[in-house]
Image (cartoon, rainbow, N blue to C red):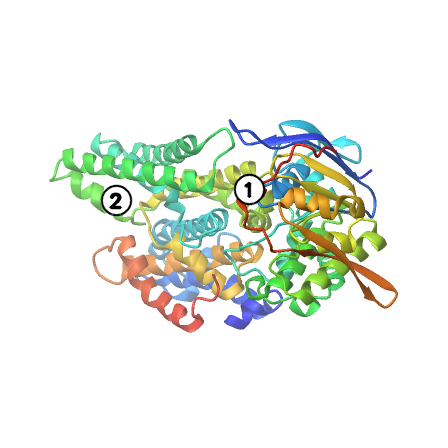
Amino acid sequence: MKRAVEKKGVNIALIVALVALPIIALFASLTLGRYEISLGSAFSILTSRILPIEPTWTEIEETVVFQIRLPRVLMAMLAGAGLSIAGASFQGLFQNPLVSPGILGVSAGAGFGAALGILIGGPAAIIQLFAFAFGITAVVGAYMISRTRMGSSLLMLVLAGMIIGAFFTALISLVKYVADPEEQLPTIVFWLMGSMAGASYKDLLWGAPPIFIGSSILLLLRWRINVLSLSEEEAQSLGINVQWLRWIVIIASTMITAAVVSLCGIVGWIGLVIPHVGRMLVGPNHKVLLPACVSIGASYLLLVDNVARAATAAEIPISILTALIGAPFFVYLLRRTGGKWA
Amino acid sequence: MIIEVKNAEFGYDGRGSVFEDVGFSVGEGEILSILGPNGCGKTTLLKCINALLKLRKGEVLIEGKRVNSLRKSDVGKKIGYVPQSHGSTFPYSVLEIVLMGRAPHLGLFSSPSAKDVEIAKEAIEMLGISHLMNRPYSQTSGGEAQLVLIARALAAEPIALLLDEPTSHLDLKNQMVILSFLEKLGENEGIAIIMTTHFPDHALSISHKALLLSNKGNGMVGNTGDVITEDNLRDIFGLDVRIISVKDGENSIKTVVPLRKGSFDRKQKLKGGIYNS
């Protein structure tokens, strides 16, 4: 793996693997669950929407694949890809591999929005809307705090993000404290731990666009993020409008993270660790790293969500599993490469 | 003239000026060295030239146009900047680092094309570091790193190069490698070069012009031989020096020898105030 970092570009086998991985994961995931569906039927059911295939499957199978499993699988992949790409971009922007997409307070803000929505007894749409709106508000707040006449420095931005994060975390606690302990409190707690359960096309319809748009912007800017990851002065001397470019990256990442949190709660670990896995495989160049993160992030969160829904009779909150499954895997990679990629 | 600086004055907000009334010009293929004691504003002046910092008074002209009226990407295209030190969080390869020099030529959403890679590789070749191409930049030595940063600046195909103490932190051989390269760059490519240095010898060896900045904030500029004299160096640095010539075959090399005697005498502080361009 270390050789891949040093070798010119990325080798073909790795590219093929990274393209194939999420596709294989998608079909495999459709077969998983209490109702048994073979890989062949899952494949035929999906392709029957594009190609005229005579149905050899039951109506129940079609409903399970299309109405229950597919939206959830798509949501997991979308969230995993989005968080990974936002994390990798933030790590580049902040010139720090320890940064996660929540560094500017978006997760805390969105978490508070959702908790507030649950507290006032709003329907799912209100909870999602509140989550998204407060997530954006938190980051705009952090940006305003950090802004000075000379533009905003990274240190100021991180500090402001921590302050905003702490503020909204306290507000979440406040909401929990006043919430009805029988009904609302458990709902809030489970919501904050994240879950893909109950994913529907309606959720995707409004949640996917911000993730798509944000990811597309970051993917288009991916080479520029290399330059942005140099010191501010160097980037400027290379003709980059640093303040402006930073702001675009922050807006795009925030859109993604806020949308993910509003769709499926706070999913930790992915945005911090998947970029590292990506760097181990393809090196630090964001031009290659960001697409790699899409593949790895989508596949990884899908894998974790499969465990969450199919491993036990009850649903396991996703945040517990992302780290529980990811930590040993990460330790393995870390020991193997000696941490040389970052 | 490629670069003209007129009546330049700079100061940080709410504080006195770092330097004032500094003026000079550098033409095609010319090399100007900026010398002066620590804290006199050498690096600051350099950063004002490519608009990383804004002058309080005066102006910087690039090919006759005010630098502040140019777009950032245009400044990046015309002026290559080689910072003193560079730390990268991520272990980019040397080629990836040099390729970033193409940034001013590329649109917001574009990545380097095959042609950009070609230009970056040419710059790497020019510096004689092709063997380092795929090595992580973080694993290069001080001398190699300096060459990489010069290659990055040249990848932008600039008309002028600003170098911040390019020979500091380098061993004797590597100092000469950099100086010879800069001299050739001026002669062959016609690039205007401005560099700051702590070594009067280096200014004497390759630069056509020299600017002496004093701690008082004003400067003295002229042909290198006229500016770097025993008297001027004593006044600027508060230290007695001798300038002697060493024969190397046909050539004679001028070198500055500092005399340590009395260098710790606090009374010999700068008198200043008499240098003006």
Residue A4, can we see it? yes
- Residue shown at 67% from the left, 65% from the top: B172
How far from the left and from the top, in percent, is residue A214?
A: 49, 42
- Could you tell me residue B150's position as x and y percent? 69, 55
Q: Nearer the viewer, residue A339 or A29?
A: A339
Three-letter amino acid code at the position of disc 1: Lys
Answer left or right for B150 relative to A72.
right
Q: How busy is the neighbourhood of tag 1: few (under 14 within 10 Å), some, or many (20 plus)?
A: few
Query: The residue marked by circle 2 belongs to what chain?
Result: A
Q: Where does residue A263 sit, x and y in percent of width and height?
A: 35, 43
For residue B34, what is the image quadrant?
top right
Residue B12, quarter of the rendered image: top right
Q: Secondary structure at mark 1?
A: helix
**Is A294 located above or below residue B44 in the figure?**
below
Q: Which residue is mark 2?
A: A191
Task: Give percent across and percent down for residue A90.
Answer: 46, 47
Q: Amino acid at mark 2?
A: Trp
Is there one chain holding both mark 1 and mark 2? no
Residue linked to disc 1? B267
Viewer-nearest residue: B35 or A172: B35
**Which residue appears at 83% of the width and 48% of the height?**
B29
Q: Report the front residue among B72 and B23.
A: B23
- In the picture, the quarter occupied by the C terminus of chain B is top right
Residue shown at 38% from the left, 44% from the top? A103
Write the residue at 62% across / 57% down.
B168
**Could you classify mark 2 by the number of other residues whose Cα lies within 10 Å: few (under 14), some (14-19), or many (20 or more)?**
many
Residue A55 in view, yes or no: no
